[in-house]
Amino acid sequence: MFNKIKLFYRDQQFFPGFLGLLINPFYFARLQLGKAMISMSPEMSGSLLDVGCGAMPYRKIFNVKSYVGLDIDTTIARKRAIADDFYDGKIFPYANQAFDCVLCNQVLEHVFNPDEFLGEIKRVLKPKGKLLLTVPFVWDEHEQPYDYARYSSFGLHALLENNGFTITRHKKLGADATILFQLINVYLYKIIRPWPKFASYTFIMTVIAFNNLIGVIAGKILPDNPDFFLDHVILAEKV
């Protein structure tokens, strides 16, 4: 029973439903990211490499022949024991043209050498291979001190094109009033993280949940703003 509750809670963190409004401080970011990933997942087929895979929260949505998780070799990643393979931050441990597609989810902002990193992704992709890339635009510093960059749409397009990719689809997530309430909740969540668990959970299910509910309404009645958004989701192809 406890394991089922734990799995349900984890699912609400990445694919939040109605209950996610009450328990997820990142409700709007995760809801829109999950929907975007689901909408683009049919583009991915064959062998998939998940670069910077972490806990592989989106693995279940990809219907592929093989799914390989790669993470940077750290004590935390080794302890998590989820990744299939590890690398040194420079060279992926795979042969040239080993994969049909690559997923890189919320990783690029933590890469100090983006040209080398994208070069490795291109190297292990087959000709015409697909890259599904997500990266934040407006977000707080996180996983410090390994948070190095934010990319505008123009900068991200130039970076990918200069490294041998052509962009086929680009979505801007959270480009509406929900971004304001998401950023407030991120701000509050960082403040309450040191609190005792009971106090922090109570705060999330009252104050943060209320902000989520108001944000849903605001997102429906206020106009969009395509220049102010949370995340990029890009589908690109190896040239």
Image (spheres, rainbow, N blue to C red):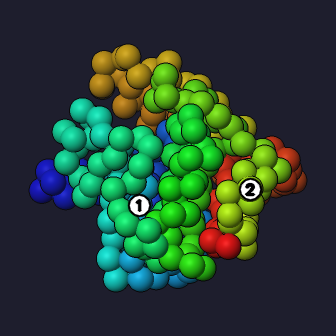
Residue 46 screen position, x and y as percent: 41, 83
Residue sitting at x 59%, y 30%? 148
Q: Cα distance, mark 2 to mark 1? A: 22 Å
Extreme residue in the front direction: 96
Of the 4 image quadrants, the one containing the N terminus is bottom left
Q: Nearer the viewer, mark 2 or mark 1?
A: 2
Q: Quadrant of residue 237?
A: bottom right
Residue sitting at x 41%, y 22%? 193
Extreme residue in the left direction: 1
**Amino acid type, label 2:** Asn
* Secondary structure found at label 1: strand
**Amino acid type, label 1:** Asp
Q: Residues within 10 Å of mark 1 (few under 14, many from 20)?
A: many
- Name the side, left or right, on which 212 lies relative to 178: left
Residue 94 screen position, x and y as percent: 35, 62
Residue sitting at x 67%, y 73%? 239
Q: Residues within 10 Å of mark 2 (few under 14, many from 20)?
A: few
Residue sitting at x 53%, y 37%? 110
Disc on res. 162:
2
Towards the viewer: 24 or 131: 131
Disc on res. 42:
none
| Residue 215 makes an appearance in the image | no
Q: Quadrant of residue 166?
A: bottom right
Q: Which comes sooner in the sequence, label 2 or label 1?
A: 1
Residue 200 screen position, x and y as percent: 38, 25
List the residue tagged with mark 1: 50
Query: Would you say the residues marked 2 and 1 are in contact, meaning their CB atoms lie under 8 Å apart?
Result: no
- Name the side, left or right, on which 45 lies relative to 153: left
| Residue 86 makes an appearance in the image | yes
